[in-house]
Amino acid sequence: MGIDSSDLFGSVFEAPPLVSVVPVLVPLPVPGPYSYAVPEGMHVEPGSVVQVPVGPRQHIGVVWDGVNDDKLDPKKLRSITLAFDCPPLSADMRGFIDWVATYTLSPPGLVARMAIRAPAALDPEPMVEGLHYLGGVPERLTPARAKVLELVANQPGPWTRMGLAHAAGVSASVVDGMTGKGMFDTVFLAPPPVVARPDPTYAVPRIEGPQKEAAAEIVEPVRAGGFSASLIDGVTGSGKTEVYFEAIAEALRQDKQVLILLPEIALTASFLERFQDRFGAKPAEWHSDLSPRMREKVWRGVVTGEVRVVAGARSALFLPFEELGLIIIDEEHDPAYKQEDRVFYNARDMAVVRARLGNFPIVLVSATPSVESQVNGLSGRYNTVHLPTRFGDAALPDLHLIDMRRHPPERGGFLSPLLLRQMAKTIEKGEQSLLFLNRRGYAPLTLCRVCGHRFQCPQCSSWLVEHRFRNQIQCHQCGYHQPTPEACPDCGTLDHLVACGPGVERIAEEVERHFPDARTIVMSSDMLGGVKRLRLELEAIANGDVDIVIGTQLVAKGHNFPLMTLVGIVDADLGLSNGDPRAAERTFQLLSQVTGRAGRTGRKSHGLIQTFQPLHPVMQAIVSGDAEAFYEREIEERQKAILPPFGRLASLIISADTRADAETHARGLRAAAPQVTGISVLGPAEAPLALVRGRHRFRLLVHGRRNSDMQAFLKAMISQGPKQRGSVQIQLDVDPQSFL
DNA sequence: AGCACGCCGACT
DNA sequence: GTCGGCGTGCTC
């Protein structure tokens, strides 16, 4: 201020400049916004992205809504360091962040962080220098200069320096020379867009029959505007993508931005190309291994509205779109939509909330919808559109169960004679077979044939799996691995290993024994050579250079195998006995996806499913194709498992790394909240859904109906409870639609 | 999330 | 006698 109170002119000039105080969400796990002073001359409003000091470091934060209600020691108040030059987060976006934070009981700052973690993207990209032709001819008209002149006479620009040189077929120094002669005006151009604008009229497909009707049903709510949720339930190969592309086209015609969420694995070049074929430009991509540079560009394009369509993994849901008008969730049932660290959420559910809050339509898509979405379809909250038949001349494979009790494999093998016979026929016809077994490595359990020693992981105590191709034993839980030992560590016997049960590598061995001349390939996520190799192998399969593919889950996802006419499921029962409440649903989805790989180009195709439980509902649903009956049963089971016999208010499932830990926590919680009747305790083996490895010791899964009641209850419990503070993670596993 | 403070076990 | 383990608390 520099004016002393003894100044002649009295107190008028002594008044300190009016500083306002605003709440700012900082990207830290603190319960709410912090208060900061706004320096004189700085303009901020709710949604502004700012940099603030927190302790010894600077963080990026967002100015939030409301007034600072806390009685903060004024001495602690610090000032906003700077306000970034980018559009503020919209009120819708802020509302969404608050909603997600409340629903997931996460610190709002951590939710906000997901929306602004594009580090240096917050300042606009520098302008590009451009040249504009002013007219005139240089004194010395060289041939190179003439070429440039010819070009700029018709198109005066603006050109970029390199762009002009390239277009004229001369070197940049020619352009520099002419610039020096004052023939060009320097102008500043906006940096080029990350992606071109998609054009809804680029290649309008001629779709007919069921596709056409489905498209009309999906497009109509987009045309009408406002919130709506649709579920496209269509078998593999029914043209679901083409159908939702029409919804995207309509949103683009209305000048809305569009978000397509895909499980990370489905974000492939082939998807982007399909999009480009329809819209003439690729969508912007958003996923975890985007380069920082690209991440910045896309983020900025999204906030400014320059990017119209984003195809992304679950984290794309938190991009701060300027005018989002449609969300598509492809492979809606995919577990990859669940995030289980820091902020726990299911992007599919939160996407529905975002659409509701933003008042625009959302489309969920799957060949095997989740039970949750089926329920929402049946109750009418989602408008379900069925696509029961394949597109064009492709037919679904003919599916049969092989009862392994009646058609056992030969000793030491895992493939039934029925399956082997069908494989032989397939090879004879020059067609391809796929054997699916969701188990990596050679065998799930390895022991010493002399003393019975089992190899256990030193880090997490699960069994080590032998990988013969790599000559390693590996832990599939934590990634620990060591070379396969030559002698048994217990009794010292050499050449001692005995394999129990099959893995893909062992199946490959068996296949080579039966079909020594066939070209066989194993595909699993730990395959040597990484993504690049994988792509080459997929290409080889598509070209018909392979006869038999043996694969894990990897082969279930989206790849198109045009020559595949036989799918064999080696062990259909595998996923059914692991205690996961969703085991049956997951197995049904996986088997449907895998068998759906066959017969995509109209050839007669078969699926043979090896099982010891041919009467199991999953097997019956798969062969009969009666998914509806299966879902009906699943819904009933789920309701039995989740609602009663617990109390009406809320029920808790407590799980921990060990059952004893879970019991301890349960005792503490029962003491802290005697009013809760339904606390059940599950050990880790019984509740893999509830188990959290790593930092968190335990986690509560809360199932119930009335969210507000549960939250009030949980918050009270957390603040009063004896030891829960700080370390407890709470996941609300209820349908967000039920209390929107 | 980071980072400091603070209190108990194996080492120069 | 110290170095270092991670439990607890704080950041506007």
Image (cartoon, coloured by chain):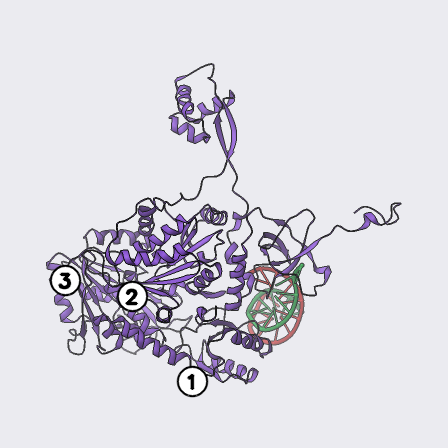
Chain colours: A purple, B red, C green
Badges 3 and 1, same chain: yes
Residue at 22% x, 52% y is A540
Check disc 1: other Cα within 10 Å, few if <14, some if 14-19, many if 20+.
few
The kind of residue on which mark 2 rests is Gly
Q: In the structure shown, which secondary structural element does the residue marked by tag 1 occupy?
A: loop
Mark yes or no: residue A493 visible.
no
Residue at 42% x, 20% y is A145
Instruction: Give the number of the disc on residue A515.
Output: 3
Q: Spatial distance from mark 3 to mark 2, Cα to Cα?
A: 21 Å
Q: Nearer the viewer, residue A12 or A269?
A: A12
Q: In the structure shown, which secondary structural element does the residue marked by tag 3 occupy?
A: loop
Task: Identify residue for label 2.
Answer: A441
Residue A649 is situated, as x and y percent measured from the top left of the image, at 50, 80
The kind of residue on which mark 3 rests is Phe
Q: Nearer the viewer, residue A554 or A500?
A: A554
Badges 2 and 1, same chain: yes
Give residue A387's quadrant in the image.
bottom left
Vertical position of residue A124 compared to residue C3: above or below: above
Q: Spatial distance from mark 3 to mark 1, Cα to Cα?
A: 55 Å
Name the N-terminal-most of marks 2 and 1: 2
Looking at the image, residue A586 sits to the left or right of residue A321; the answer is: left
Q: Nearer the viewer, residue A682 or A586?
A: A586
Mark yes or no: residue A258 visible.
yes
Residue A135 is situated, as x and y percent measured from the top left of the image, at 48, 21
Check disc 2: other Cα within 10 Å, few if <14, some if 14-19, many if 20+.
many
Task: Identify residue for label 1.
Answer: A645
The kind of residue on which mark 1 rests is Pro
Check disc 3: other Cα within 10 Å, few if <14, some if 14-19, many if 20+.
some
Query: Disc count in the image?
Result: 3
